[in-house]
Amino acid sequence: MLKIGNLLIEKYPLLLAPMEDVTDPSFRQLCKLFGVDLMYTEFISSEALIRNVGKSLLKLRIDDSERPVGIQIYGENIDSMVEAAKIAETANPELIDINFGCPVKKIAGRGAGAGMLCNIPKMIEMTEKIVKAVRLPVTVKTRLGWDDNSKHIVEIAERLQDTGIQAIAIHGRTRAQMYTGKADWSLIGEVKNNPRMKIPVIGNGDINSGSMAKEYFERYNVDAIMVGRASIGRPYIFKEIKHFLEHGTEMTPLLLEEKVKMAKTHFEKSIQWKGFPRGLFEMRKHFSNYFKALPDFKEIRIKLVTSMDQNEIFDTLDFIQEKYKV
């Protein structure tokens, strides 16, 4: 069970991780159809938000059909983060989430995201001030530490809890690992089983199947599981996981025609939401995954991810359905 403020999600909660250029409304709406319990916006720069940058303001838009939704913000300046949290609150999400986990150089390298793991006192001060500045529940997403020599997440989680946050999501890698190697859930389990921890602990990293989700729920006793990269081009993963959690068996795979229809809908919504060509560019990572299991798919995939013609892409999707139909 997951309880954050007035939000209550019963047994085996599944969350969609915030991902830049991925978790926009076009993708969130699909994930919602497949049973995800809580989603997050793409992460939003605090500096861009307080300066009314159009792209960042667009990320604040939430459709009621997507709820519950959290808005995630990041930045290195405490005052800017506090102001950004107040602005995000006006969009009326269910919660405000602070990104202390993004490992990319342009963010972590300047002290934001996972870069905050190099300055724990500042992390704590920033979190405390944001909690006091808004009425909504505040949560945090972070990593095990900066590198193998600084995996202090058990202590950090305690200190973050003391600021008043209402949940913590932990990605089982260090910043130095980026997304390589295997996520270490043992430390996530230590945080959850620390008798001082009273807030929900959400585990994140490598979950890509129902059997794995069930095993990790039971082994590490986390309050919820957050799915990230495994959902790209696979919004139905949440339905697959829930089916296994409920029945102990794998869900019958979706038909190819269902995936084609889904990809078309996703593409249309992406263009509608982000315009052309940006909506097309951001669909390419999804196209690669929607059909990656098909044999001899390389040439078709290249066409999907290089074409600049919307009609050609729809024709290619029709061709996939015709070519591989049983």
Image: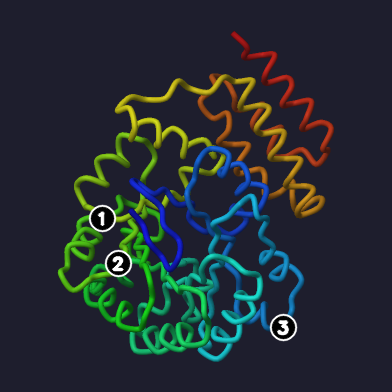
In the depicted structure, whether residue 165 falls above or below residue 68 = below
Q: Nearer the viewer, residue 12 or 52?
A: 12
Q: Position of residue 49 (x, y in %)?
A: 67, 78
Residue type (three-letter) at the residue carrying disc 2: Leu
Helix, strand or loop at disc 2?
A: loop
Q: Which residue is mark 3?
A: 51
Of the pair 181 and 40, the residue shown nearer to us: 40
Farthest-out residue, front: 6
Say few, some or many: other residues with alpha carbon within 10 Å of mark 1 (under 14 / 14 to 19 / 20 or more): some
Q: Nearer the viewer, mark 3 or mark 1?
A: 3
Task: Give me the residue at 61% from left, 41% from top.
Answer: 30
Q: Is the C terminus in the top left, top right, bottom left or bottom right quadrant? A: top right
Image position of 98 (left or right of 48)? left
Pointer 2 residue:
144
Residue at (60, 20) in percent of width and height = 256
Label 3 to label 1: alpha-carbon separation? 38 Å
User: Viewer-proximal residue, 83 or 172?
Assistant: 83
Q: Earlier in the sequence, mark 2 or mark 1?
A: 2
Q: Amino acid at mark 3?
A: Arg
Location of residue 57 (image quadrant): bottom right
Q: Which mark is residue 184?
A: 1
Badge 1 element:
loop
Q: Position of residue 129 (x, y in %)?
A: 46, 89
Pointer 2 local density, CA inside 10 Å: few below 14, some 14–19, many at least 20: many
The answer to the question of whether label 2 and label 1 lie on touching residues, with beta carbons closer than 8 A, is yes
197 relative position to 17: left or right: left
Q: Quadrant of residue 50?
A: bottom right
Q: In terms of secondary structure, where does tag 3 sit?
A: loop
Label 2, label 1: how many angstroms apart (C-alpha)? 9 Å
